[in-house]
């Protein structure tokens, strides 16, 4: 089984990225042949400073390795080290009806937020389909917000196969229902574009400060509180055991404890959860050549697989 996922190098990684995509990807390493990549071509739609892009790629590589991506088991590479994917993207775009892309809400969301309405932003899902199809991927672990892109990928693959024969494997999304939508500080989906994130590798003081700023209602300390829909509890559930969560819920209902105390407990639990990964990250920061070597090896393996699929697709449509 081929497992594939990508992450854009467009900023610091947050708790939503971790539980929605990275942790599931790390666990799946044992279930099949995993290919994970840094989607730098995609990030060109939003990051326009070359130095910033290079720095982000380095940071994401280190962070993903720190979070448990094991290059002995998974192939880890930069998207742009396999330029074959852009050629496949063109072949796919010739079978993609405009309607498939018009229905994608991420383009509208991004242009509504003020991003320039470029062709790259509009065609983003086609490049993503090429990423997935070029590695004959079976399973794609992503957060809930990528579900529509997976549907488009499946539709594009089916169109191509109907026109030219069985070239592509049809992939399945793997979305974890329980952790697919991690809330941010304000209760909306945690996202760097909403300014409501908790970084996984932020410094201690600002991280504590952010957690203390989680939005709550104005129930006084002594009064009972509703644990249902509480952002504090939803985040705590990600890093605490079932018993600890039940205990916090009971204290919410009993009253007598203020939100500030619950937030402190959440901070401690989060900080501890990421401690081993923080330590591993320190080691990786001191070994940039090792990280570069991992990406270079990964690119070699990925490129061989991509070449084979691209040749199949080229031949199928009459280009060889
Ligand atoms: P952002 O919304 O911060 O820009 P990305 O779109 O770069 O994050 O997401 C990278 C990966 O992390 C995707 O697989 C996405 O589904 C997942 N992800 C992002 N935010 C969340 C969240 N709040 N909950 C669960 N998964 C998330
Ligand atoms: N669009 C994904 C995101 O924003 C990143 C991505 C690009 C991706 N290509 C992919 C994810 C292929 C999974 C498979 O998070």
Image (tube, rainbow, N blue to C red):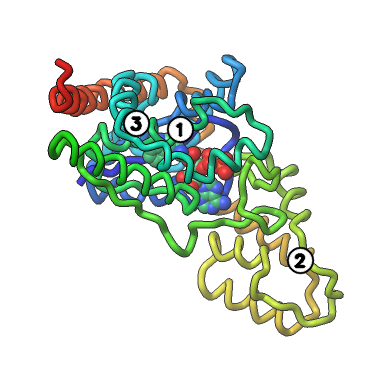
Q: Give the residue pinned by disc 3.
A: 76
Q: Earlier in the sequence, mark 2 or mark 3?
A: 3
Query: Looking at mark 1, is its residue's CB closer than 8 Å to ligand 2?
Result: yes
**Which residue is disc 1 drawn over?**
124
| Numbered badge on residue 98 | none
Residue at 46% across, 25% down = 40
Q: Distance between the residues labelled 1 and 2?
A: 44 Å
Query: Label 2 belongs to which residue?
Result: 261
Specify whether 314 is left or right of 299: left
Q: Residue at x 65, y 47 (%)?
A: 198
Describe the element under mark 2 as helix, strand or loop.
helix
Q: Residues within 10 Å of mark 3 (few under 14, many from 20)?
A: many
User: Quadrant location of residue 188?
Assistant: bottom right
Q: Do the residues labelled 3 and 1 touch (CB within 8 Å)?
A: no
- Residue 255 location (% of width, % of height): 77, 81
Q: Which of marks 1 and 2 is nearer the N terminus?
A: 1
């Amino acid at each position: 089984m081929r497992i594939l996922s990508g992450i854009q190098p467009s900023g610091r990684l947050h708790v939503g990225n971790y539980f929605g995509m990275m942790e599931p990807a790390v666990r799946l390493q044992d279930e099949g042949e995993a290919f994970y990549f840094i989607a730098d071509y995609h990030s060109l739609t939003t990051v326009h400073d070359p130095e910033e892009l290079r720095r982000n790629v380095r940071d994401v590589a280190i962070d993903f390795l720190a979070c448990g991506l094991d290059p002995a088991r998974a192939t880890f590479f930069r998207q742009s080290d396999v330029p074959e994917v852009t050629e496949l993207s063109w072949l796919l775009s010739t079978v993609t009806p405009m309607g498939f892309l018009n229905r994608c809400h991420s383009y509208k969301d991004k242009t509504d937020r003020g991003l320039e309405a470029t062709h790259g932003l509009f065609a983003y899902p086609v490049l993503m389909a090429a990423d997935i199809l070029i590695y004959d991927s079976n399973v794609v672990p992503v957060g809930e917000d990528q579900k529509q892109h997976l549907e488009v990928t499946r539709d594009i693959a089916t169109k191509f196969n109907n026109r030219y024969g069985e070239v592509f494997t049809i992939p399945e999304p793997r979305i974890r229902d329980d952790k697919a939508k991690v809330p941010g500080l304000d209760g909306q989906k945690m996202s760097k574009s909403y300014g409501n994130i908790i970084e996984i590798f932020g410094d201690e003081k600002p991280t504590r400060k952010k957690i203390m700023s989680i939005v709550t209602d104005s129930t006084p300390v002594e009064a009972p509180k509703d644990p249902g829909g509480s952002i504090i509890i939803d985040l705590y559930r990600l890093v605490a055991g079932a018993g600890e969560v039940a205990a916090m819920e009971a204290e919410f209902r009993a009253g007598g404890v203020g939100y500030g105390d619950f937030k402190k407990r959440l901070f401690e639990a989060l900080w501890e959860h990421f401690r081993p990964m923080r330590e591993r990250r320190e080691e990786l920061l001191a070994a940039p050549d090792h990280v570069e070597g991992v990406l270079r090896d990964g690119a070699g393996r990925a490129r061989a697989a991509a070449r084979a699929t691209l040749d199949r697709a080229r031949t199928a449509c009459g280009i060889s």
